[in-house]
Image (cartoon, grey):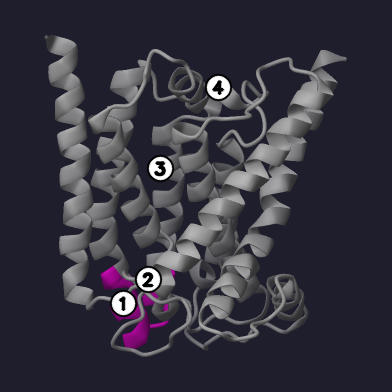
Amino acid sequence: MDLIRALLIQGLQMAVVLLLAPLLTGFVRKIKARLTRRQGASVIQPYRDLIRLLRKEAVLAENASWLFRVVPYLVFASTWVAAALVPTFGGGLLFSWTADLIAIIALLGFGRFFLALAGMDIGTSFGGIGSSREMMIASLAEPAMLLTVFSLALVAGSTQLSTVAAMMSSPEVGLRVSLGMALVALIMVAIAENARIPVDNPATHLELTMVHEAMVLEYSGRHLAMIEFASSLKLVLYLSLIGCIFIPLGIAAPGAGVADYLIGAVAYVAKIGIGAVLLAVFETSIAKMRVFRVPDFLGAALMLGLLGTLLLFVSRSL
């Protein structure tokens, strides 16, 4: 009976992140439209777009290989698994032993690698530009993310998310400058990884500025639906990660009752909603930077992660 209950809760978490991803994307777009005094599309418009794309036929180039056809499903699967591993409304779930921060980074890197290969598979100039820019961003974003993980590991003594969330919610941690640096670094990495302003603009198709859109420009139909769905899941993943680690309020303890899980679900939705509003306000109030300024932006995240790790390491040594 306990195993069935654990399976149901784990399956519910996987379903929650899957169903919430398009809604979050639509909510961010709606808030941005309101901030710029526009009506904007409905918050459920991403669901309609995904259904419309799934109904359309996938048009492939003549020189598209099997890799081009398989990559959308690989990207979607790896992103969904990574997002489902992050504790949302409850901790200590059935697969929590696999919810390791380094494993999540590896899953995201797996999807990024194959998406970059797919961008170059057709041989178009846009795909090559997008893939090279994506790898440039990843070469700085991944080390900054790893340094943030090391900072958290020095505090919690583990890279497992359930252990980190439990430790961060305890009064022993308190407010630390090093954790503040890790938080800012994680936010900067999340902006870059999700192709948001000021690093990239998900709503543009200008060849001089686009990064992610250039890699997926040749996709259509169900393939494009999988990639768009994966992009929405990645946004949910990073907001969930920030909420789980730095705002671990309301997360139900292992073996908790139904009421605790409901409170955790309400708290999770509230944290995601607040994060979406802050993201929309930030994107509306700042302009997109030039592509060659992106290394400076991510370099700052890398230095913040490094300084946070060094401060924690020195404090533990004293």
Q: Position of residue 87 (x, y in %)?
A: 59, 33
Q: Assess whether mark 1 and mark 2 are in contact (beta carbons under 8 angstroms).
A: yes
- Mark 3 secondary-structure assignment: helix
* C-alpha span from label 2 to label 4: 34 Å
The residue pinned by badge 3 equals 106
Which residues make up the magenta segment? Answer: 118-133
Q: Is residue 203 visible?
A: yes
Q: Quadrant of residue 290?
A: bottom left
For residue 226, side relative to residue 301 (left or right): right
Residue furthest toward the right?
A: 1
Picture residue at 36% right of the left edge, 21% below the top: 174
Q: Position of residue 44 (x, y in %)?
A: 74, 70
Alpha carbon distance from label 2 to label 3: 24 Å
Mark 4 or mark 1: name the one nearer the start of the chain: 4
Q: Is residue 48 left or right of residue 313?
A: right
Residue 228: numbered disc: none
Residue corresponding to mark 2: 197
**Considering only order in the chain, which callout, 3 or 2, is on the residue closer to the N terminus?**
3
For the image shown, how many numbered marks are present on the structure? 4
Cα gap from disc 4 to disc 3, whole angstroms: 16 Å
* Res 74 visible: no
The residue carrying mark 4 is 97
Frontmost of labels 4 and 1 is 1
Q: Three-letter amino acid code at disc 2?
A: Ile
Quadrant in the picture for residue 23: bottom right
Q: Which residue is mark 1?
A: 288
